[in-house]
Amino acid sequence: MGESGLGLWNALLRHYAMGGFPEEALLLYREMRRGGGGGLPGDTFTFSFLVKACANLLRVVAGMQVHGVTVKNGLEPDVYVQTALLNMYCECGLIGEGQRMFDGMPERNLVTWNAMMTGLMKRSEVDKARVLFDQMCERNVISWTCMIDGYTRAYRFMEALLFFYRMMGEGLCPTEITILAVVPAISNLGALDIAESLHAYCQKNGHTMSDIRVSNCLIDMYAKCGSIDNSLKVFKEMADDRNLVSWTSMISGFAMHGMAKEVVELLERMGRGDIKPNRVTFLSMLNACSHGGLVDEGLRIFSKMVHVYGIEPEVKHYGCMIDMLGRAGRLEEAEKIILEMPVDVNVVVWRTLLNCCAMHGNAEMGERVMARILELERGYGGDYVTLSNIFSVASRTTKLELLWQGLHRQGSRFSVELARGDVPRARQSSTDQGRRSNRLRAAALHHLSPPTRLAVGLRGLELPPSLPCTDPVRKNLHFLLPATRRMMIERGTETPSALVMSPLVMVVAGPAPPHRFGGFSCAFGFAVSELFFLLLVQHL
């Protein structure tokens, strides 16, 4: 057929390989070689498209066969063929082959460098990718996006954000993909001011209008930064452009903030439209009902998921149900659900019930649940500590002593350590006194609700003389909270003396849903007024 005929075959191969039909691309090449194309041998473009098809299918053996044909036909030295082969090996997980291909290339273009960096990032070889990035003479937005995404996936969020700023400083405009790469870093840092700046940039440059994924990420980002109001604002601005991810992100945001009533209302609005919730949506709803104390609503939502939408519950859905019933003190119902679960019960489910037993001091069920945990695995220190707390609250001193004696015979060791930071020498004596005082207060506060315990913990919180609105303050709350949590304090004045008189909204975010103190429902289903909250801190 000649060169014009080969061009037509290449056009078809390109369409199939890059248009989502890689299997058809391989079949088309077979037809081309068997006679439909007159036995054409193919050129560099032909094999570049074939290698791309193999990469999309993750068929490394077929890719190696194509590699062998390129060597046989003398086409391997071509930079486009080598770049395609490099990308194929990296996509298939053979990063060593890809590295050897890269090192042996006599000529490299920008696509080659980006492909090698992307392959290293997928293997979490962030530092090696950084070395390549620094060696590049020319970089484009794809190069920067690759580094930002790699740092984000490696949980090195600050470095991802710094790379984003460096890219902007060099005059490169981020694409929608760049925005999607940096948003998780901002979310995990809880940097609300940066989130608002990024949102303004997206609006100015039309990213929110051109890609719905950006708007969906903004909803999630604001929720994780503690500003559920901004999440709702973005959600409302989307209007008719919302998809299932949009609704699920907003529901997850409400659930994250313990706003169970808003979750239920949003579900009703969603049900009146054409978009139907999926497993992830229902998981967020059940989680919100669990932490919001809406047991009846949670049971109704679970029933609707099964009988109306025909979604088979997974172990995570059952875990939310058990947590919801357990928090409400309905431990027998929670245990019955576990025993009747049609799916395999894992140790996390039993551990959830054990924590609920500790919450309500049910020693008998706690022992049964601990036995179930030990049937599935050896158990870890946290399980024994939880069971010992149950025995302690229930005044089962004999069983408590037997438990610790058994652990000591097994060679277990226990220690108490500080979770964050060192203490300056000038404050060590006062810190020691504070620890002794905390141990005494911990026993007295055991039965108080978490928001009340939080109020007591805030008694010694040191605020700077000037605290900008929504400025994150990171502090340990001693024995009151299981981990360091981010506190967002919003107030209309900068003077601490006016804190009592001015409206105060506090959001404490962490592993559990945030507690929102302000004059509205918090995560535990009751209202906390500003005056009561501040008086509580003053008097404890």
Image (cartoon, grey):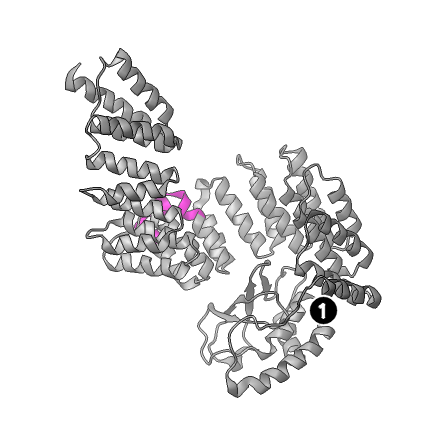
Quarter holding residue 151: bottom left
Where 476 falls versus 49 (above or below)?
Answer: below
Where 167 falls versus 531 (above or below)?
Answer: above
Relative to the observer, which residue lies in front, 518 or 405? 405
Relative to the observer, which residue lies in front, 136 or 478? 136
The kind of secondary structure element at disc 1 is: loop
Question: Does the magenta-highlighted stretch encompass residue 423?
Answer: no
What amino acid is labelled 1 in the image?
Leu
Can residue 237 be seen from the camera position used here?
A: no
The residue stretch that appears in magenta: 202-216
The image position of residue 98, as x and y in percent, is: 31, 41
Q: Specify whether 267 is left or right of 32.
A: right
Q: Specify whether 444 is left or right of 103.
A: right
User: Residue placed at 67% from the left, 45% from the top?
Assistant: 346
Q: Quick one: quadrant of the C terminus?
A: bottom right
State the residue position of label 1. Answer: 448
| Mark 1 Cα shell of 10 Å, populated few (<14), some (14-19), many (≥20) | few
User: Residue placed at 29% from the left, 39% from the top?
Assistant: 86
Magenta span: predominant SS is: helix
Quarter holding residue 2: top left
The image position of residue 224, as x and y in percent, is: 50, 57
Question: Does the magenta-highlighted stretch encompass residue 206?
Answer: yes
Can residue 172 be seen from the camera position used here?
A: yes
Relative to the observer, which residue lies in front, 393 or 376? 376
User: Residue placed at 27% from the left, 53% from the top?
Assistant: 133
The image position of residue 180, as x and y in percent, is: 39, 49
